[in-house]
Amino acid sequence: MVVVAALAAVVVAGAASRFCVRKRRALVAERAARRLTDGVQARDMEAFTVRLNEAIGARAVLTEADLILDTALAVHHPYYPEGGSQ
């Protein structure tokens, strides 16, 4: 009877040890996935910021060009100061 109890204790301890090892490996994998996701998110946000700043700069140039064109057209067409056609 003692042998059976000792064998059962060894089996339970082995199962508990295996369970803990599997949980630890899963936790390590989750942490690695989180670090990877954070790195990708940071890279994507940086790329998005660069593209957004370029678009804002292009819009500023177009707005300035529109103002210059409207001013030039207003000089030649005083009845249409906004630069539009008749």
Image: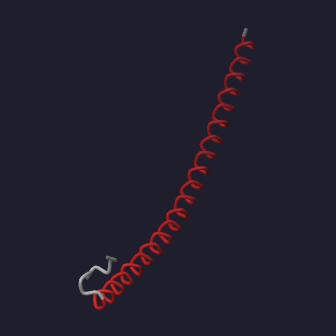
Q: Is residue 62 left or right of residue 7?
A: left
Q: Residue at x 56, y 60 (%)?
A: 39
Q: Residue at x 46, y 69 (%)?
A: 52
- Which residue is more in the foreground, 17 or 48? 48
Where residue 2 sits, quadrant-wise, is: top right
> Where's the C terminus, which quadrant?
bottom left
Q: Residue furthest top?
A: 1
Q: Residue at x 66, y 42 (%)?
A: 25
Where residue 24 sits, quadrant-wise, is: top right
Q: Is residue 50 left or right of residue 66?
A: right
Placement of 10 over or under 26, stated as above or below: above
Placement of 76 over or under 86, stated as above or below: below
- Which residue is more in the foreground, 67 or 55? 67
Q: Position of residue 35 (x, y in %)?
A: 57, 55
Q: Is residue 66 left or right of residue 31?
A: left
Placement of 36 over or under 80, stated as above or below: above
Q: Residue furthest left?
A: 79
Where residue 10 sits, quadrant-wise, is: top right
- Which residue is more in the foreground, 28 or 77? 77
Q: Position of residue 68 (x, y in %)?
A: 35, 87
